[in-house]
Image (tube, rainbow, N blue to C red):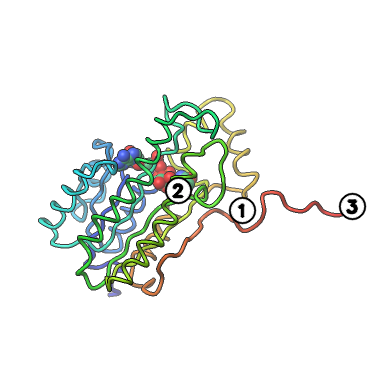
Amino acid sequence: MLKKRLEGKVALITGAAQGIGEETAIVLAREGAMVIVSDINDELGKGVASKIGASAIYLHLDVRSEKDWAHAMAVILEKFFKLDILVNNAGVTGFQEGFGPQDPENASLESWREVHAVNSDGVFLGCKYALQTMKNNPGSSIINISSRSGLVGIPGAAAYASSKAAIRNHTKSVALYCCSQGYNIRCNSIHPAAILTPMWEPMLGNGPDRKDRMAQITKDIPMQKMGMPDDVANAVLFLASDESKYLIGIELTIDGGLLAGAGAPPAKAE
Ligand SMILES: NC(=O)c1ccc[n+]([C@@H]2O[C@H](COP(=O)([O-])OP(=O)(O)OC[C@H]3O[C@@H](n4cnc5c(N)ncnc54)[C@H](O)[C@@H]3O)[C@@H](O)[C@H]2O)c1
């Protein structure tokens, strides 16, 4: 029988109660990893772990909290003796209720900080604790979920874009640091766009114009459709596995072709 791609590996996924994180947990477990499903939404997170079965446990982990990270690493070492894979996936857009406007002129400092606390502080803490835990392993992988928004400006979601750009850059610092220290830990970032998950619900809504809103999103995507969580989960699987053993500091875009061209293509000559 063929060996599974992550046989014997232990993987921690943040924000895994739904969406991309949930699908990633399912895919990594299917490929033989022991999976730690973590989130702040304990009810949904426990549901994901029990759906996966014996190869998953649920752990409460608020990525903003250093205490939670220390606790998570202690539990993982006690139960599984090592950590091989960290997927820093938890993220917020700033479009949640009460966050107010997200443009550079009107966003509040409080909401700017809150978005960065989850997206960039969370990834910083995750990498920090993972390095300390993984540095004596023969081969480990950290995958940071950034966004297309970390590569281009987004006027209506400035904090999100800035926090995702920080993830892109920090990934490269971590990757190079690991080389300089002789740690066998690879670190790469993934840049999805327009993946249909609950994150889009506040933007799509449930009103009669949901279809029009969806069409508005897909019309600018060269592939003319949104991506699905497994499109990202399968890329995580590749970066988590030893198949990508010579890849560090890369930024892998998963966006139906959005970044392959220009938003304002030259007009066709009449
Ligand atoms: N869906 C997309 O189109 C898209 C595009 C680009 C990037 N991303 C990124 O992919 C990742 C997953 O996105 P998604 O679409 O599945 O989102 P989602 O909103 O469906 O899921 C995000 C999960 O993160 C959890 N979370 C929020 N704050 C947290 C915290 N402080 N600590 C721990 N968990 C927390 C939520 O409870 C939720 O389960 C995010 O980082 C997002 O920015 C998504």
Secondary structure at numbered mark 1: loop
Amino acid type at circle 1 is Met
Can you say whether 262 is above or below 48 in the image? Answer: below
| Residue picked out by circle 2 | 164
Residue 197, image x, y percentages: 44, 42
| Residue picked out by circle 3 | 270
| Residue picked out by circle 1 | 223
Residue 49, image x, y percentages: 24, 47
Q: Number of labelled discs?
A: 3
Amino acid type at circle 3 is Glu
Q: In which quarter of the image is residue 62?
A: top left
Can you say whether 124 is above or below 179 in the image? Answer: above
Cα separation between marks 1 and 3: 26 Å
Q: Quick one: label 1, few (<14), some, or many (20+) residues within 10 Å?
A: few
Can you say whether 53 is above or below 187 in the image? Answer: above
Q: In this view, does 211 lie to the left or right of 120?
A: right
Amino acid type at circle 2 is Lys
Residue 69, image x, y percentages: 22, 48
Figure quarter occupied by ligand 1: top left
Q: Is residue 81 left or right of residue 43?
A: left
Secondary structure at numbered mark 3: loop
Residue 205, image x, y percentages: 51, 29
Q: Which residue is drawn at 28% across and 67% down?
A: 140
Q: Which of marks 3 and 2 is nearer the N terminus?
A: 2
Q: In this view, does 223 lie to the left or right of 160?
A: right
Between 125 and 109, the one nearer to me in the picture: 109
Residue mark closest to the camera, 1 vs 3: 3
Question: Mark 2 vs ligand 1: CB under 8 Å?
Answer: yes
Q: Is residue 191 left or right of residue 7?
A: right
